[in-house]
Amino acid sequence: MSEPRKLTEKEKKAMYRRWIFTAGLGYNYETQQAPSVAFSMAKALRKIYPNDDDYIKAMDNHYKYFNITPQMGNVILGATLAMEEKDGIKAYDAVQNLKTSLMGPLSGVGDSVFWILFPTIMGSIAGYMALQGNPIGAIIWIAMYVALYFVKMWLFKLGYTSGVRLITTLGERINIFTDAVSAMGLMVVGTLIATVVKVYTPLTFITGKVKLSVQTGIFDKIMPGLLPVGLAILVYWLLGKKSWSPSKIILLIIVISLAGAATGILGITPTK
């Protein structure tokens, strides 16, 4: 067994860039993101383990089941890299235990922040500005993804320098933070439905000399935004219960819109 070697700053950056750009590649049902982990760690482990047997054993250890929000994977890979750099192949079991124990908690945080908070809030801001014809909305969206690259780089350094200590120190705060972010995301989605989703019917009931608009006289009296909420419930049901893909749902909405416009059931909201 040979002594592990230290990595340079350039080699560490190369390792986490590999993860950032390949986290979704090689995904499979048996080991999920493990091929990307092995690819990301390959060069760094080759430097740490000059002995072929140790290198093969370490690579095999990283080619086991791994699944996490890609953005948060940097934290775990940074921590495991630090352990292998310090203890070498003696950290074989500890590395796998660390990955197994942190995948769940960090995915909870990552899913809430990177799949709910950022896309929902920043997407609603960018989308609303785009609807107003303001190009800054698109610039904000692009700038957010550029900024996320540096956030991911910082997360790797955080994992490398703090490792397990970071997770154990935060403890229950992670769960509180995750719940708070989820609640905020749901509030933003609810606001988004009422303000951005537009469903309008121009139908009018006529009895004798009495005219009653279905939209303003019935739906808006019951609850303003009732039709957009109904559409959101339909989409949620199709996604959750029927496992429809977003593409199929978009096509369905287009077909409903065309059919509704052709028959006069749906129309464009009149401007005041």
Image (cartoon, grey):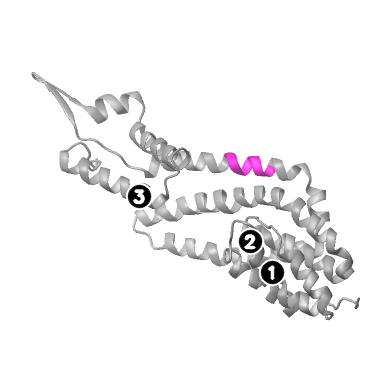
Locate the N terminus and report the quarter of the image it occupies: bottom right
Locate the C terminus and report the quarter of the image it occupies: top left
The quadrant holding residue 59 is bottom right
Query: In the rendered structure, which segment of residues is drawn in magenta?
Result: 177-183
**Sequence order check, earlier mark of 2 and 1:** 2
Q: Nearer the viewer, mark 3 or mark 2?
A: 2
Residue linked to disc 1:
38
Residue 33 — which label? 2
Locate residue 26 relative to residue 172 in the image: left or right. Answer: left
Question: Residue 188 at x, y = what percent?
Answer: 50, 43
> Is there a contact, CB below 8 Å, between mark 3 and mark 2?
no
Instruction: Identify residue type, mark 2.
Output: Gln
The quadrant holding residue 144 is bottom right
Q: Nearer the viewer, residue 234 or 244?
A: 244
Count of number-bearing discs? 3
Q: Nearer the viewer, residue 172 or 237?
A: 237
Between the C-alphas of marks 3 and 2, the distance is 29 Å
Determine the secondary structure under disc 3.
helix
Question: Residue 71 at x, y = what percent?
Answer: 63, 60
Residue 105 — which label? none
> Does residue 249 appear in this view?
yes
Whether 41 is among the magenta residues is no
Determine the secondary structure under disc 2.
loop
Residue linked to disc 3:
250
**Sequence order check, earlier mark of 3 and 1:** 1
Neighbor class of circle 1 (other Cα within 10 Å; few <14, some 14-19, many 20+) is many
Instruction: Identify residue type, mark 1.
Output: Ala
